[in-house]
Image: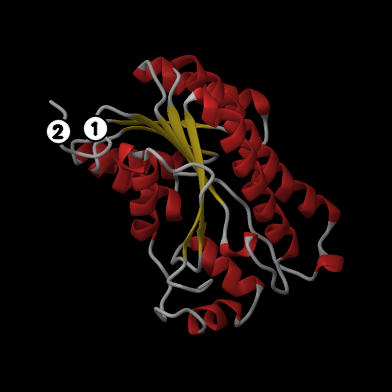
């Protein structure tokens, strides 16, 4: 029997980009908060591992694979979620790519791939999730931007451009779908201890440490801290929040 005192009890939630980092840690938080989960990412092995971990802890969870830059994959991922649970109450659109290098040094194919995953992929997810949620007249979507989507810095221009775009998509979706019962918000994490942060450390030497030093809390965040924020935004506790850009950044943007 589900524990109806949990904030996400009875809700079916899709977590995209769930194989590692913020996505995997958020999946753990959402499961503990009572959600039934569909986890999605490109790689089956890591997804199977996190799914087994959550099942062993007694949670309801399944997984599927796909590339969010491909419309057919996104449609299938959403339809598999609905086919399994009969509904889609919430979605966390977390899959993304990062990069390093001055704007004039970014290869065209890398720029195109970042935009295909981070921007087009987010749009495809919103479109397909909304298709299902609009039929039900309710739902909540949380997208992932970054503090890099709210300000500029050197060395990650293509990534930052994509994250600015995710904020624009979110704001538009909040206006488009709010009158129809859907809430759409976006989180903007600061440095968070994940494999992607390690990639950023390699791509932009010293950049991560500089940002942490400029953060009032003087630390990087954790995936669980981000996950708690996502859980709140997906829950009925955030019933009057839509179009919100919520930094999870230790005060960096304060």
Q: Is residue 241 left or right of residue 235?
A: right
Q: Could you tell me which residue is drawn at 51 percent across and 66 percent down?
A: 190
Q: Residue 248: give x, y in percent of width and height.
A: 45, 62
Label total for image: 2
Dot label at residue 9: 1
Q: Residue 180: give x, y in percent of width and height.
A: 52, 23
Q: Residue 102: give x, y in percent of width and height.
A: 79, 71
Mark sitting earlier along the chain (1/2) = 2
Q: Could you tell me which residue is drawn at 74 percent across and 59 percent down?
A: 158
Dot label at residue 3: 2
Quarter occupied by residue 170: top right
Q: Is residue 67 visible?
A: no
Q: Residues within 10 Å of mark 2 (few under 14, many from 20)?
A: few
Label 1 and label 2: CA atoms lie apart by 6 Å
Q: Is residue 154 left or right of residue 215?
A: right
Q: Are marks 1 and 2 in contact (CB under 8 Å)?
A: yes
Quarter occupied by residue 18: top left
Q: Residue 36: give x, y in percent of width and height.
A: 30, 31
Q: Residues within 10 Å of mark 1 (few under 14, many from 20)?
A: some
Who is closer to the viewer here, 140 or 156? 140
Image: 108 above or below 68: below
Image: 218 above or below 168: below
Q: Could you tell me which residue is drawn at 62 percent across and 39 percent down?
A: 122
């Amino acid at each position: 029997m589900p524990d109806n005192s949990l904030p996400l009890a009875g809700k079916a939630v899709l977590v995209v980009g769930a194989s590692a980092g913020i996505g995997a840690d958020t999946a753990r938080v959402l499961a503990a908060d009572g959600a039934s989960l569909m986890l999605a990412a490109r790689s089956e092995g890591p997804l199977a591992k996190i799914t087994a971990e959550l099942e062993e802890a007694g949670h309801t969870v399944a997984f599927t694979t796909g590339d969010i830059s491909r419309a057919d994959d996104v449609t299938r991922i959403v339809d598999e979620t609905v086919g399994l649970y009969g509904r889609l109450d919430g979605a966390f659109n977390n899959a993304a790519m990062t990069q390093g290098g001055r704007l004039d040094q970014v290869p065209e194919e890398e720029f195109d791939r970042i935009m295909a995953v981070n921007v087009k992929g987010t749009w495809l997810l919103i479109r397909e999730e909304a298709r299902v949620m609009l039929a039900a007249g309710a739902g909540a979507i949380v997208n992932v931007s970054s503090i890099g989507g709210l300000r500029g810095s050197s060395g990650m221009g293509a990534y930052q451009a994509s994250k600015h775009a995710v904020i624009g998509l979110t704001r538009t979706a909040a206006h488009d779908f709010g009158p129809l019962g859907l809430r759409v918000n976006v989180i903007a994490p600061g440095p968070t201890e994940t494999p992607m942060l390690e990639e950023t450390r390699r791509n932009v030497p010293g950049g991560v440490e500089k940002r942490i030093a400029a953060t009032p809390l003087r630390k990087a965040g954790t995936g669980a801290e981000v996950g708690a924020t996502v859980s709140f935004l997906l829950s009925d506790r955030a019933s009057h929040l839509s179009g919100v850009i919520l930094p999870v950044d230790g005060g960096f943007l304060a």
